[in-house]
């Protein structure tokens, strides 16, 4: 299948489309600004309350007539542009495929050589988030604003979180296990280097051991000798540093040691320097780095509670050598068998994290509706993801029953090459949702090859269902169509037969904003849909019941700018408590309670409305392989930038060979 790298089949249509949109854009921009000036966010309301001169009200009185006059003047040009733009959409392709042009930073082909399916397995990490990148006037109804600046900051935070070092912490003592993994890697800069074992100290510990097998670009003799040891990591654990922690009586550090640690931590510098100025980003409150904000790894500030203090151990050790052990593109994970958890019967790790997981391989985003914001977001994500599919959907009356003013809002980013892609539009959208070409994006990626030159592939699907409350029938119909399209895409892109498999399927993942939760009484039909018999939800016990550790992903928009939750660290701490969740999450609806949010939070049980899903299936995969969830995360790194919590899931694909 040919991947479309441009929206139109020839340059003439592209130029004509740009010209028509150039005629429409002034009218669109003026209307957006005019409506937006009358829809303030709670942050703006607080600022205006402190303005004794009513300066903002005066600005509105002055600018409104100007906007109206310019809007009326631009209408004839917009009409001409619309008459050109609308018929062109019949020739428009359903998505744009973008590949990083800078060969110095492209590593997708290299990743394919890392897994030959000859080891014990490989892990893959998937992320999903609703980022609410609507035109600014519409985004304000969700209490977020400045869409262009938010898009740039969202992309920057995601790539910074995904490109941080991975430290796997193995705790040998059952005591003092409360080391926060969230902000540890914000203290160090990702660097390559040699892979010698280095001993260093950590707060509440006596020693740490960094094992750098397969971690850097310089694989010397010492590296090859280490691979023969018992501590050799799995094939899927490349770019990983392993930290072994031994408890010591109460694990306290002296004040002198703490001061030394803080000085060395500051000397290590930020993880990645900012590539853009802060002039535009500082226009919105949620982009300002405050004390305790670890959302952006290039910030020098982080909460004191979440910093893990690093110091050089006994003997003379070069600090740069220590930093070289904290390698690129990974996250901190605690070993499941020894990690202190409330729910010990769970087979995989689960947490509320202040960062996107490191080694994030695939990212699915929803509500990237604004085209200018999509370009800014793509530019930021390309610093980490080599392959991106964006501007997904149809416009005008092409491909769907009703007129579509905006695209589907779906965006996909990958570190691995995309082989095939397909998009389908839901034809049954209602109300405001019918104005967007909501649908499903299906992708096939190559993640490796066997020693017999068989391709190892994976399938990823991203979708966004009907949002209006009460449209249960519409969502169920969309789930039916989604299952049919999934099956069709698998059949149309498969080049294997049972007798002679040319491809081995490693995983099949479905994610997105499904706009229903598993606990609301009004969503019973969706909860019992047959999709959940084919795909597994790691957070779900059964219809109407989530696992105790699962939390809601829909934030209460009114509280987005409260000081308690406006930074990733603060939001993480709030969501870890039941009272905090009741204050800042939207809760499941119940027929026995009124629709007033505040009136029913105290009486309802549960942990909030979880409408953002990460599902996986074992059906249709290579029979000799096994897929298991290794880690599931609710992420607070986009605090203040969107009204949804991103989610992430790490899957381990076990080949069954050379199991330890």
Image (cartoon, rainbow, N blue to C red):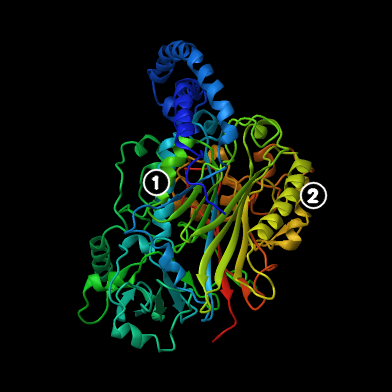
In percent of width and height, residue 368 lies at: 52, 41
Q: Residue at x 37, y 53 (%)?
A: 383
Q: Nearer the viewer, residue 1 or 57?
A: 1
Q: Which of the 4 quarters of the picture holds residue 350?
A: bottom right
Foreground mark, 2 or 1, reads 1
Secondary structure type for disc 1: helix
Q: Nearer the viewer, residue 587 or 273?
A: 273
Task: Specify whether residue 354 is in view.
Answer: yes
- Residue 314 in the figure: left or right of residue 227: left
In percent of width and height, residue 44 lies at: 45, 29
> Which image quarter holds the C terminus?
bottom right
Residues under labels 2 and 1: Cα distance? 40 Å
- Residue 84 in the figure: left or right of residue 517: left
Q: Give the total number of marks visible in the rendering.
A: 2
Mark 2 and mark 1 in contact? Answer it, CB < 8 Å.
Answer: no
Q: Residue at x 57, y 35 (%)?
A: 91
Q: Nearer the viewer, residue 419 or 244?
A: 419
- Residue 91 in the figure: left or right of residue 536: left
Name the residue that disc number 1 marks.
379
Q: Residue at x 35, y 38 (%)?
A: 282
In percent of width and height, residue 218 lies at: 29, 75
Secondary structure type for disc 2: helix
Task: Specify whether residue 550 is in view.
Answer: no
Other-residue count near label 2 (Cα within 10 Å), few / some / many at <14 / 14–19 / ≥20: some
Up/down of 585 relative to 320, above or below:
above
In percent of width and height, residue 22 lies at: 44, 25
Name the residue that disc number 2 marks.
525
> Which image quarter holds the N terminus?
bottom right
Other-residue count near label 1 (Cα within 10 Å), few / some / many at <14 / 14–19 / ≥20: some
Mark sitting earlier along the chain (2/1): 1
């Amino acid at each position: 299948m040919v991947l479309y790298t441009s929206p139109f089949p020839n340059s003439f249509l592209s130029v004509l489309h740009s010209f028509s949109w150039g005629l429409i854009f002034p009218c669109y921009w003026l209307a957006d600004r005019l409506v937006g000036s009358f829809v303030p966010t709670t942050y703006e309301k607080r600022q205006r309350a402190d303005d004794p001169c009513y300066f903002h009200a005066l600005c509105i009185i002055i600018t409104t007539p100007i906007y109206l006059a310019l809007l009326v003047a631009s209408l004839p040009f917009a009409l001409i542009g619309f008459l050109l733009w609308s018929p062109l959409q019949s020739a428009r392709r359903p998505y744009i495929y973008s590949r990083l042009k800078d060969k110095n930073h492209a590593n997708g082909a290299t990743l394919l050589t890392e897994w030959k399916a000859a080891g014990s397995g490989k892990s893959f990490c998937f992320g999903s988030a609703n980022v609410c990148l609507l035109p600014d006037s519409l985004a304000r109804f969700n209490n977020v604003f400045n869409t262009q600046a938010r898009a740039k900051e969202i992309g920057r935070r995601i790539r910074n979180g995904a490109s941080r070092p991975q430290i796997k912490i193995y705790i040998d003592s059952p005591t003092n296990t409360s080391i926060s993994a969230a902000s540890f890697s914000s203290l160090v800069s990702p660097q390559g280097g040699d892979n010698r074992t280095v001993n260093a100290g950590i707060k509440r510990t006596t020693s740490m051991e960094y094992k750098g097998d397969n971690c850097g670009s310089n694989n010397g003799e010492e590296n090859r000798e280490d691979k023969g040891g018992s501590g050799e990591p799995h094939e899927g654990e490349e770019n990983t540093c392993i930290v072994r922690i031994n408890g010591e009586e109460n694990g306290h550090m002296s004040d002198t040691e703490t001061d030394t640690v803080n000085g060395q931590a500051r000397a290590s510098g930020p993880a990645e320097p900012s590539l853009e100025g802060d002039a535009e980003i500082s226009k919105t409150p949620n982009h300002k780095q405050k004390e305790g904000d670890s959302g952006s790894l290039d910030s020098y500030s982080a909460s004191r509670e979440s910093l893990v203090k690093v110091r050089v151990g006994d003997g003379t050790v070069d600090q740069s050598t220590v930093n070289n052990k904290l390698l690129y593109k990974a996250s901190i994970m605690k070993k499941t068998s020894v990690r202190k958890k409330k729910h010990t019967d769970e087979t995989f790790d689960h947490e509320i994290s202040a960062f996107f997981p490191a080694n994030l391989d695939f990212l699915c985003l929803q509500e990237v509706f604004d085209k200018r914001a999509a370009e800014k977001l793509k530019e930021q994500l390309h610093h980490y993801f080599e392959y991106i599919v964006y501007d997904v959907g149809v416009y005008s009356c092409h491909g769907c029953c009703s007129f579509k003013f905006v695209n589907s809002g779906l965006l996909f980013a990958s570190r691995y090459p995309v082989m095939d892609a397909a998009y389908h539009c839901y034809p049954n959208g209602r109300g405001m949702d019918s104005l967007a070409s909501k649908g499903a994006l299906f992708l096939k990626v190559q993640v490796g090859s066997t020693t017999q030159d068989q391709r190892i592939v994976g399938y990823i699907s991203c979708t966004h269902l009907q949002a209006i409350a009460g449209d249960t029938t519409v969502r169920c119909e969309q789930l039916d169509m989604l299952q049919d399209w999934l099956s069709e895409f698998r059949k149309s892109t498969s080049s294997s037969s049972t007798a002679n498999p040319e491809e081995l399927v490693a995983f099949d993942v479905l994610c997105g904003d499904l706009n229903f939760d598993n606990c609301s009484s009004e969503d019973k039909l969706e909860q019992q849909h047959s999709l959940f018999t084919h795909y597994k939800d790691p957070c779900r016990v059964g219809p109407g019941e989530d696992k105790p550790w699962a939390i809601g992903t829909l934030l209460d928009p009114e509280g987005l700018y409260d000081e308690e939750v406006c930074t990733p660290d603060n939001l993480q701490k709030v969501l870890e408590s039941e009272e905090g969740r009741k204050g800042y999450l939207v809760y499941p609806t119940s027929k026995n309670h009124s629709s007033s949010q505040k009136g029913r939070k105290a009486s309802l049980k549960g942990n909030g409305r979880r409408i953002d899903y990460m599902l996986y299936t074992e059906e249709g995969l290579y029979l000799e392989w096994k897929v298991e969830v290794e880690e599931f995360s609710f992420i607070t790194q986009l605090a203040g930038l969107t009204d949804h919590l991103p989610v992430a899931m790490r899957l381990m694909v076990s080949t069954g060979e050379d199991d330890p």
